[in-house]
Amino acid sequence: MSQTPTPKQALILWCLLGKHGSALQSEVVPKVDAADRRALVSGRYLSEEKQGRSIRLTVTDGGWNWAGQHLRDPLPANFRVLQDWLERIDRHLATTGETLAGLIGTPATPGPRPAESPSAESLPAKPTRSRTAKAAPPGSAKPRKLTKKQVRARIEAAYLALTEGQKAQAVRLSALRAHLSELDRATVDAGLAAILAGDPTARLSQLSDPKSLSADEREAAFSPAGEPFHFIWIQS
């Protein structure tokens, strides 16, 4: 990265990070001018892609790294409140050792819009697959035992199906499990455990308000050592 973001470009990055790292350009405040977008893309802080009539902006790994190292950089004077909050976040991360991505990755409200529709549509397919499994001869489930890499690949394929090919989106584990209903729970849990143990491109997060969880979401949660996780994120 040869160029440092201007204060306005930094605000664009912070706005996107507040939206979990990705949003349509029209949703970003301050308004993204073409010159600022080109500068952030050429500096490898953002990536852009056409989505319908709009442009989706996504913070790159370089953008995440820059943000984690520049929480105390000065912002325009009328954004003093944001400046104070970023400094508090910087102190929190320094004290706890938590990463900025981990902190931002915990949704404050129930997650993504698109993930829920596909999951609901996929639910009726479960009985069909279940009947097929029952009709199979005894022992037919044994060949379905997958390697860790295969399970990870299946999880990512299901994730991309639910987000319509988008990364850096929160997907509910209830939707993910429904999409992977041909795999037993232990297999999916093993894949989630591997991600939690240290996957550089994926992470699990929790819902901050347990009261908003449905019974299905509680059932679908991945709870190692009694600590429930409700969402999965896969970065680019």
Image: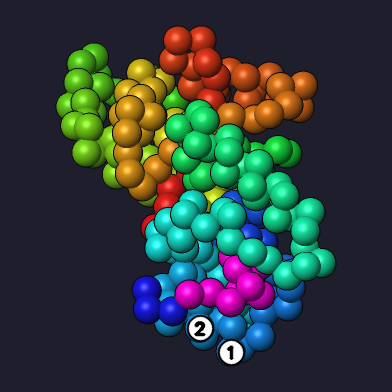
**Residue 51 in magenta?**
no
Q: Which residues are magenta?
A: 4-13
Indicate whether 198 appears above or below 235.
Answer: above
The residue under label 2 is: 39
Residue at 59% x, 55% y: name it. Answer: 72
**Residue 7 in magenta?**
yes
Q: Which mark is residue 35?
A: 1
Question: Secondary structure beneath disc 2?
Answer: helix
Q: Of residues 187 and 128, which is closer to you in this image?
A: 187
Q: CA distance from mark 2 to mark 1?
A: 6 Å
Q: Of residues 54 and 7, which is closer to you in this image?
A: 7
Residue at 32% x, 39% y: name it. Answer: 199
Image quadrant in which the C terminus is located = bottom left
Q: Amino acid at mark 1?
A: Ala
Residue at 64% x, 23% y: name it. Answer: 216
Whether label 2 touches label 1, CB < 8 Å:
yes
Question: Secondary structure beneath disc 1?
Answer: helix
- Count of labels in the image: 2
Indicate whether 8 appears above or below 175.
Answer: below
Q: Residues within 10 Å of mark 1 (few under 14, many from 20)?
A: few
Indicate whether 37 appears above or below 155.
Answer: below
In percent of width and height, residue 76 lies at 73, 70
Instruction: Report whether residue 166 is seen.
Output: no
Quarter assignment of residue 133: top left
Residue at 44% x, 79% y: name it. Answer: 3
Quarter assignment of residue 28: bottom right
